[in-house]
Image: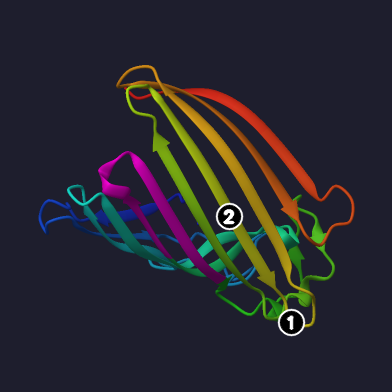
Amino acid sequence: GENRLDNVVGFELDPKLLAGLTFNIMAQTGESTSDSKKGETGKDSKNDSFDSVSTSLGYENKDLGLAIAAAGDFGIKGKYAAYGLKDVYTDAYRVTGSYDIAKSGFVVGALWQHAEPTDDLTAYGQTYKSDGSIDKAGKAYRGLEEEAYAVTAAYKIPNTKLKVKAEYASAETQVSGQADRKIDLYGLGLDYQINKQARFYGIVAQQKRDWLNDDDKQTVVGTGIEYNF
């Protein structure tokens, strides 16, 4: 659900105007011609002001410790990691929320998303793999769609500068006539708040792909410092 777009015009409603209710809309101007470009699988004629639209509606109440939102992407480039596909024009719908239990510093969150290509990929003679090479089986993606969800938890340890975080995410990708492919991700993190502007963090995460017999797991360990000016 994380897409970084360019060439966009957006509008964002100030949440103070409607007691915490927010609305966002963003339109991306297309720059393609009638000829499909490398990596742009599906919808190859994108040259109008509203070819791609992303919008969301949310509500936040800090007194209750509650935040919820629903969002939709229409014709936005996305990835299908289970098949190594990227830059596929996609329609996606997601719902997310978080709650600070009893405002104790223990925050739980969840996200659900459904995604499917904007166009029927079988109408195109070729698609591209994540490395940019032509996928000769490009017409095999009939019925491509993905269901994903994630649950998170974070706890700020009282009287310390430490916050412990955990996440579990799962994405199941379906293609007609083929076995479903599932990717699971487990992650743990620890933040140390140096001051109001800076924090040090460390993470460890593991990803598992259920359709692989060898090298089906990938583990990542990282540290970093974030500074807000």
Q: Are marks 2 and 1 in contact (CB under 8 Å)?
A: no
Q: Residue at coordinates 71% horizontally, 76% vertically from top-left?
A: 124
Q: Is residue 112 magenta?
A: yes
Label 2 sits on a secondary structure element that is strand
Q: Is residue 24 left or right of residue 224?
A: left
Over which residues does the magenta segment extend? Answer: 95-115
Q: Residue at coordinates 37% horizontally, 42% vertically from top-left?
A: 106
Give the label, 2 or 1, closer to the camera.
Answer: 2
Task: Say if residue 46 shows up in the picture.
Answer: no
State the mark number for residue 55: none
Q: Nearer the viewer, residue 188 or 29?
A: 188
Task: Say if residue 108 shows up in the picture.
Answer: yes
Q: Position of residue 102 (x, y in %)?
A: 27, 47
Disc 2 to disc 1, C-alpha distance: 24 Å
Q: Nearer the viewer, residue 16 or 171?
A: 171
Residue at label 2?
A: 169
Q: How is the image coloured?
A: rainbow
Residue type at the position of mark 2: Ala
Q: Residue at coordinates 79% horizontally, 76% vertically from top-left?
A: 140
Q: Position of residue 181 (x, y in %)?
A: 74, 66
Q: Position of residue 59 (x, y in %)?
A: 24, 59
State the mark number for residue 176: 1
Residue type at the position of mark 1: Ser
- Name above or below for residue 90 compared with residue 215: below
Q: Earlier in the sequence, mark 2 or mark 1?
A: 2
Q: Nearer the viewer, residue 209 or 143?
A: 209
Q: Main secondary structure of the magenta part?
A: strand
Mark 1: few/some/many CA within 10 Å (<14, 14-19, 20+) = few
